[in-house]
Image (cartoon, grey):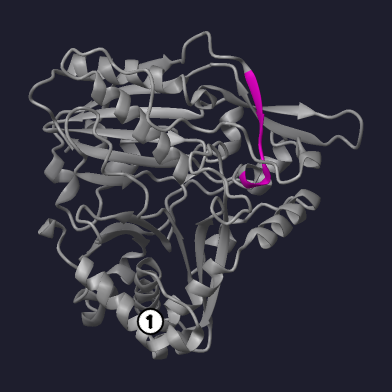
Amino acid sequence: MESQEDEVHHISTSIIRPEPTITHSRIDLTTWDLRLLIPGYIQRGLLFTKPKSQDSETIISNLKTSLSQTLDHFFPLAGRLAIEKHDDDDGSTSVYINCNSTGAEFIHAVAQHITVADILEPIYVPSVVESSFFSLNGVMNYDGLVKPLLSVQVTELNDGIFVGCSVNHAVCDGTSFWHFMNSWSEISRSAVGGKSSIRTISRLPVLERCFLKDADRPIRLPFSIDDDCFRKRHVFNTIKSEYEVRFYYFRRETVEMLKAKANADFGPTNGCRISSLQALLGHLWVAVTRARRLDPNGETNYSVVVGNRTRLVPPLPKEYFGNSLQFCVATAKVGELLEKGHGWGALLLNRVIMSPDDAAIRRSWDSWVQKPVFPERSALFQGSTLLTGGSPRFDMYGNDFGWGKPMAVRSGIANKSDGKISVIPGLVQGSLCVEACLSPETLMAMENDTEFANTVSPANYL
């Protein structure tokens, strides 16, 4: 019997470029960018119902044309990473984006026997989504020296369309990625129905990289990312670990209840205001820790990716295109976390999330310039660790390419392991959705955990 993965067939692969008049330029990478050279690409995709008013040829043609026009504004995504070797010292190197319009990749694929229901109805996300709906699986960000910085795969399903994007994380973060997607859908939507597409977008990206110290430009590394020793030392294991992917949906009323209880228990006495997201993550932290049956005397960590744009003085514009983020880590004793509950976990998360200010960000910058350090995958994903990226503030469901808004958001295999938690907005304002990558044993224990299960809503409540 043919597997779902075997049912995805590539029809064509194209190279999409911006207008040739786009100025050739060099964009030096900052410390925020360079730290992300070793993980895999950002892989996010949108699932749509197939429009009845447009045929396949029209849809693919419009997507290619609008992507080219979007790259006129986001032209770094059509370039490649490059290395400058400095001969005036001990052989240090710098990494930059060569905006040479080599081009982004566009793949047209077909999975005629896979339906929207096949993707949405199973309890666990089908493996075909990770393995066959995205390109550049197993590619590291440092491979952007030769690989496209952006690769799009549009897969036609029996009754739907899946638009999967793989973007080099050293080039941009989630904020910039969704800015790009919002702009692409804006241009595509304008051309539906035979109209001439707009060539301008409502929010232009700010492409000038932020260097907190001009003297640091370009930042020098005491090694080269094309060196075999560097790659062997920092390669992330691309073999899928033992995890399944499940989506949990939380109604607005549930999120508000978790937030109110967390603040009532720990907010006033600690002089802080716990947010909805922090309360939900605290709730997940407790549930996963309980399901993992960890040693009560041991420690558990929760790493959260936070943005720097609004924390700097002066702040970066929200349209800043690049990376501006860092990791914050909360640590708790397992027994204490389980005893005190989700409000305690939310408080610990609140403290580390609120701690990076302008001065702390600048100290971190200086420290990394002096001694570049890359995170090890083993340190990010341990049996007692959770890691959360993504944000409910990203406009994911506003990406209407001309066929209506997406039904769901899904992700590829890149950077996933047991303990990876991604947060996306719910379709209903105030609701939240969590993509949880956890071991089958942990997921089963959570399903049998009445306290947690009673807070989860069925996917179809939306």
Looking at the image, residue 405 lies above or below residue 371: above
The residue segment tinted magenta is: 25-32
- For this rendering, which residue is in front, 378 or 63? 63
Q: Position of residue 430 (x, y in %)?
A: 25, 61
Res 97 visible? yes
Q: Secondary structure at mark 1?
A: helix
Looking at the image, residue 135 lies above or below residue 314: above
Residue 29 among those drawn in magenta: yes
Outermost residue toward the left?
52
Q: Which residue is mark 1?
A: 263
Looking at the image, residue 397 sits to the left or right of residue 68; the answer is: left
**Quarter-of-image position of residue 229:** top right
Q: Position of residue 234 (x, y in %)?
A: 64, 47
**Quarter-of-image position of residue 194:** top left
Question: Which amino acid type is marked by label 1?
Answer: Asn
Q: Position of residue 327 (x, y in %)?
A: 57, 59
